[in-house]
Image: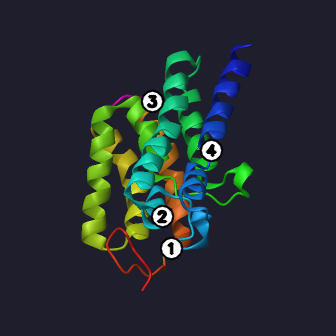
Amino acid sequence: MEIIFDLALAAIGYGFGSLPFAIWVTRWLKGIDVRSAGSRHATATNTFRQAGIGGGILVLVLDIAKGFIPVYLALTYGNSEWVAPLTAALAVIGHCWPAIAGFRGGMGLATSGGAILAASLLWFFIGVGILVLLVLLIRHSARASVVAGLILPGAVWITGYQSQLFWIAFSVGVVVAIRFLDDWNREYHELWLDRPN
């Protein structure tokens, strides 16, 4: 029964991650599909672009919650150490490839942040700092996100933090890196809110 319960927790991760808040909020506020313009991804950034600051902030908070809630539940109630990392990975996978939205979702950064936040407030902010620094240095959001996804678990490992946090960072980092490879050659016209010309 314990393994069934743990697998159910992991499945909840995908279910939470699959909730396409960017699509719903943009449709509610503007009557359009957020994926029809801008980056064509269902992200908080693209919601800022299509539906304004209020809509963008709402989606950002909800996308973070999609990672935080299921991973918090897995850390609190899971019976095995693998439950939280698997739940985290599935939450991000659900965000990026949501079954209820034609498998066309977001990029996974906010949901990954929420998963890490459930394990460590400190490492949530460290992860944000690493990403911002890399964006400033590389000046390409997708490439910076790929590198950040691969660097963060190593940073956790080197500093000797608990294995749960390392595996959560590793699982979401790999998914984010794979997802952002799609945009590796994309041209960005602004550093963050890359509006098309």
Which residue type carries mark 3? Gln
Secondary structure at badge 3 equals: helix
- Seen as rendered, the residue at the extreme bottom is 197
In this figure, which residue is indicated by the disc labeled 4?
19
Front disc: 2 or 3: 2
Secondary structure at badge 4 equals: loop
Residues in magenta, as a range: 160-164
Query: Disc 1 versus disc 3: distance between alpha carbons?
Result: 36 Å
Judge from the rendering whether residue 34 lies leftward or rightward of residue 130; answer left or right.
right
Q: Which mark is residue 164?
A: 3
Judge from the rendering whether residue 98 lies leftward or rightward of residue 89; answer left or right.
right
Query: Disc 2 versus disc 4: distance between alpha carbons?
Result: 16 Å
Q: Is residue 99 above or below residue 48?
A: above
Indicate which disc, 4 or 1, sits on the residue closer to the N terminus. 4
Indicate which disc, 2 or 3, sits on the residue closer to the N terminus. 2
| Relative depth, front residue between 186 and 58 | 58
Which residue type carries mark 1? Gly
Cβ–Cβ under 8 Å for marks 2 and 4: no
Indicate which disc, 1 or 3, sits on the residue closer to the N terminus. 1
Q: Is residue 174 magenta?
A: no
Front disc: 1 or 3: 1
- Residue 34, by quadrant, is bottom right
Which residue type carries mark 2? Asn
- Residue 135, by quadrant, is bottom left
Front disc: 4 or 3: 4
Residue drawn 34% across the image and 31% down it: 120
> Does the image show residue 87?
yes
Q: Work out which quarter of the rendered image holds the C terminus and state it.
A: bottom left
> Does the image show residue 160?
no
In this figure, which residue is indicated by the disc labeled 1?
38
